[in-house]
Image (spheres, rainbow, N blue to C red):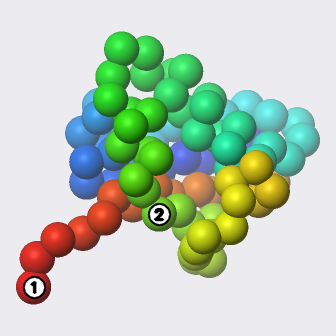
């Protein structure tokens, strides 16, 4: 199982702060995003996630290609929208 956590605008778009994805094998971050969007049809979640940074555990993904980043069962992915303010 992979836990997906949403923050700020992503949480608002999903209508929840987390989802659980059942999988026996690793998924790419791109696949996780697709599954998240599929769990919340008719929302703006896909658009919001496209602007989000991601953490796997406590490690930022940075600018890595989401199709090349593996997420293993038992890990947590967090999606953080850009922050504003000063």
As drawn, 79 above or below 4: below
Q: Nearer the viewer, residue 74 or 64?
A: 64
- Inter-mark Cα distance, 1 to 2: 19 Å
Q: Where residue 32 sits in the image (x, y, percent)?
A: 65, 40
**Residue found 24% across the figure and 69% down from its top:** 83
As drawn, 81 above or below 26: below
Q: Where residue 26 sits in the image (x, y, percent)?
A: 85, 47
Q: Nearer the viewer, residue 18 or 65?
A: 65
Q: What quarter of the picture does the C terminus occupy?
A: bottom left
1 and 2 marks in contact (CB < 8 Å): no
Give the mark nearest the N terminus, 1 or 2: 2
Location of residue 14 (image quadrant) = top left
Q: Is residue 57 visible?
A: no
For numbered disc 2, what is the local secondary structure?
strand
Is 3 on the left or on the right of 22, as rendered? left
Is 29 on the left or on the right of 82, as rendered? right
Q: Where residue 84 sits in the image (x, y, percent)?
A: 17, 71
Residue for badge 1: 86
**Residue found 58% across the figure and 73% down from its top:** 62
User: Residue extending furthest left?
Assistant: 86
User: Residue extending furthest bottom?
Assistant: 86
Q: Nearer the viewer, residue 78 or 18?
A: 78
Q: Is residue 37 visible?
A: yes
For numbered disc 1, what is the local secondary structure?
loop
Residue for badge 2: 53
Q: Nearer the viewer, residue 50 or 56?
A: 50
Mark 1, residues whose alpha carbon is within 10 Å: few (<14), some, or many (≥20)?
few
As drawn, 26 above or below 57: above
Number of numbered labels in the structure image:
2
**Residue found 81% across the figure and 57% down from its top:** 68
């Amino acid at each position: 199982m992979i836990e997906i956590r949403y923050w700020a605008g992503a949480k608002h778009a999903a209508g929840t702060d987390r989802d659980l994805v059942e999988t026996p094998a690793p998924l790419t971050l791109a696949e996780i995003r697709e599954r998240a969007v599929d769990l919340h049809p008719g929302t703006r979640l896909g658009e919001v996630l496209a602007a989000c940074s991601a953490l796997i555990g406590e490690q930022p993904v940075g600018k890595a290609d989401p199709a090349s980043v593996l997420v293993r069962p038992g890990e947590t992915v967090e999606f953080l929208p850009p922050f504003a303010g000063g």
